[in-house]
């Protein structure tokens, strides 16, 4: 059974870099059948997509965050990671990782999130 | 104007049907898009409900009851999530989502459903 577990510091100082990890069990981040992504949710607000990554390393990022975001995969650990630089209080929220199926193992065609992790809460404060 | 607009809240009685709308911004044609729907209960991650583009291009999420269904109102340029036979356990926030043609996912602001 697929499980996604986010982890990382719960508190980050303004202007620093937020770094999170999502450990995948029950599937492989190297599988051609999926993209893997990050989504966040500020307290009391809606969902915001951050970005997705494929096993080839191909990435898609939210245009509003693109200059600050890096998503990568560590195949040896079966993890994906998120780095968000120059954080401010507006980056406070719950961060989720998720799986996104492809169509027929195609890198150029995939669907939305079908399985989500439980999320990890991050506060940006000095 | 937001790309996807959802009513902030909706209330309905147990056993009734609830129609949640996701209106696409003018200039974005709902007919061209798959609309995804997610349910989120307090303190929990979103759960995938279904995706709908047309009756021939749709998918129900694993384990999602058939009383959740998708459709479109082309005249209103909106995607619709229909919940039939509302139950108390359906109280939650519901989000729609699309893949924008410029290569990014966009979420609606969410609708809070209350079962009275």
Image (cartoon, helix red, strand yellow):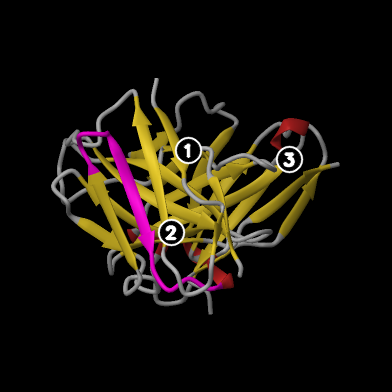
Left/right of residue B94 with respect to residue A87 in the rendered view: right
Task: Residue under label 2, please give it.
Answer: A49
Task: Residue under label 1, please give it.
Answer: A117
Label 2: few (<14), some or many (≥20) within 10 Å?
many
Cα separation between marks 3 and 1: 21 Å
- On the same chain, marks 3 and 1? The answer is no
Q: Quadrant of the N terminus of chain A?
A: top left
Q: Is A116 situated above or below A92? A: above
Where disc 3 sits, the SS reads loop
Give the residue at the far bottom of this rendering: B1
Where disc 2 sits, the SS reads strand
Say which of B100 and B54 sits in front: B100
User: What is the number of the mark on residue B91?
Assistant: 3
Say which of A120 and B115 sits in front: A120
Label 3: few (<14), some or many (≥20) within 10 Å?
some
Say which of A69 and A46 sits in front: A69
Q: Quadrant of the C terminus of chain A?
A: bottom right
């Amino acid at each position: 059974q697929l499980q996604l577990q986010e982890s990382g510091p719960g508190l980050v100082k303004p202007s620093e870099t937020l770094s999170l990890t999502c450990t995948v069990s029950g599937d492989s981040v190297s599988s051609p059948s999926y993209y893997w992504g990050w989504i966040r949710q500020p307290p009391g607000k809606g969902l915001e997509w951050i970005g997705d990554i494929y096993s080839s390393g191909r990435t898609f990022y939210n245009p509003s965050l693109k200059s600050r975001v890096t998503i990568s995969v560590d195949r040896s650990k079966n993890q994906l990671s998120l780095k968000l630089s120059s954080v401010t209080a507006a980056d406070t929220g719950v961060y989720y990782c998720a799986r996104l199926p492809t169509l027929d193992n195609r890198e150029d065609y995939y669907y939305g999130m079908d399985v989500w992790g439980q999320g990890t809460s991050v506060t940006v404060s000095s | 104007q937001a790309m996807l607009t959802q009513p902030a809240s909706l209330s309905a009685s147990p056993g009734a049907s609830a129609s949640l709308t996701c209106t696409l911004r003018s200039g974005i044609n709902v007919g061209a898009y798959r609309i995804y729907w997610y349910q989120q209960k307090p303190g929990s991650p979103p759960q995938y409900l279904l995706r709908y583009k047309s009756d021939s291009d749709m998918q129900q999420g694993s384990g999602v009851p058939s009383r959740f269904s998708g459709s479109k109102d082309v005249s209103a340029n909106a995607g619709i999530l229909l919940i039939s036979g509302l139950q108390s356990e359906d109280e939650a926030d519901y989000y729609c989502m699309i893949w924008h043609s410029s290569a990014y996912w966009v979420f609606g602001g969410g609708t809070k459903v209350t079962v009275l």
